[in-house]
Image (tube, grey):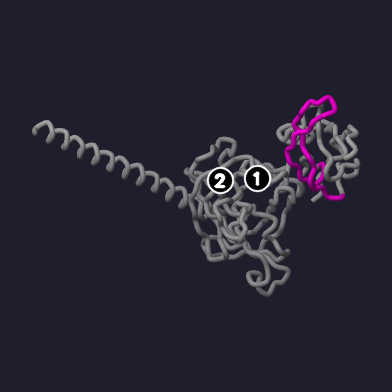
Amino acid sequence: MKLFQTYGLNYILVILLTFAATWYFISDDKNKLVTASEKSIESVVTISSSSSQINSRKNGGIGSGVIFSEDGYIVTNLHILSGNNINVRLNNGKNYSANIIGIDKNTDIAVLKIVSDKKLNPIEIADSQSIKIGDRVLAIGNPYGIGISVSNGIISALGRDYGNPYLQLIQTDAAINPGNSGGALINENGNLIGINSKIFSKTGAYQGIGFAIPSNLVVQIVSELIQYGKIRTTWIGNFRVVRVRVNLKNNKIVNALKIVEIDDFGPLYEKGVRENDIILEINEEEGTWSNLTKSLRFAGLGSDIKLKLSFKNKEFKVINISPDQTKKIN
């Protein structure tokens, strides 16, 4: 009987300790998220734009933005800007007229500038290379124009690309709805890891799949736009690819990239590249996604891009694109 009583008491004690530990960790986790939100929310703004000065909120787009510097530079998504009459509303309720400093269509990034008599509160930026799948995150923005709001989730995946070689996105299940675009995706420390950009949805509303532009890329693009007003990084045309496996004439199966869409301008198009062409080799390496993105980075440093392609008639063609042919035009 005593043995049963001792066992029962020990069992109850374990349950109580488990409950206490669980409550402690849940409470601590909640406090971390609250602190992170409070730290960054003042750095997220509402942006409205239109081609009319009468009422930008009613006549144009509305979205979010992030304060990049204390002297008034703000980063947002290009797609939310519907005109040159742009209004920025800070979290304290003050409104400012904004000018467009520069845009980059490939990454959907735009940089705005406002003039304030006081220093702004820029967001702290984290290294997006250090994030991992499963990390807790918060999305801050103005969904549907109802006001700055915070939602939480995790990083669901990394390196999502939609076939765009210039862009690899962070995937999150934090609620991102229309109006959140251009807002902040932050980590548990309240530091920026991405700019919320788009959602995957059949209805146009949140369905658990959202995407953000990694902070490292944001810093690179924004810095270029502020300093030069344009992007000087490598651009060989607007195109999308999908990964494929190709059986060559010698029955060797290789990884390759099939072009599924290409605009009718730019270096690639001018060299005769068209839809359904297949990139077999990039700088004499396998035609993989990582090799394509690597070649674009190195071309920006002055290296040529050499592509070996297969056309519809199974003929091969090698084209060279030099850095002076890769000037970015916004």
Give me the C-alpha separation between circle 2 and circle 1: 10 Å
Amino acid type at mark 1: Val
Q: Is residue 109 magenta?
A: no
**Image-quadrant location for residue 159:** top right
Q: Does residue 285 lie above or below 267 as drawn?
A: above
- Looking at the image, the residue that sits furthest to the bottom is 54
Labels 2 & 1 near each other (Cβ < 8 A): yes
Q: Which residues are magenta?
A: 236-264
Dot 2, crowdedness within 10 Å: few (<14), some or many (≥20)?
Answer: many
Residue 200 seen in the current view: yes
Q: Nearer the viewer, residue 31 or 232?
A: 31
Magenta: main secondary structure equals strand
Amino acid type at mark 2: Leu
Q: Residue at x 70, y 72 (%)?
A: 53
What residue did someone put label 1 on? 218
Residue 284 is situated, as x and y percent measured from the top left of the image, at 81, 26
Q: Nearer the viewer, residue 274 or 198?
A: 274
In this picture, residue 295 sits left or right of residue 154 = right
Residue 209 is situated, as x and y percent measured from the top left of the image, at 58, 51
Residue 121 is situated, as x and y percent measured from the top left of the image, at 54, 52
What residue did someone put label 2 on? 192
Point out the tag, 2 or 1, that comes first from the N-terminus. Answer: 2
Residue 73 seen in the current view: no
Check the picture and name the quadrant holding the N terminus. top left
Residue 30 is situated, as x and y percent measured from the top left of the image, at 39, 48
Q: Does residue 41 lie above or below 250 as drawn?
A: below
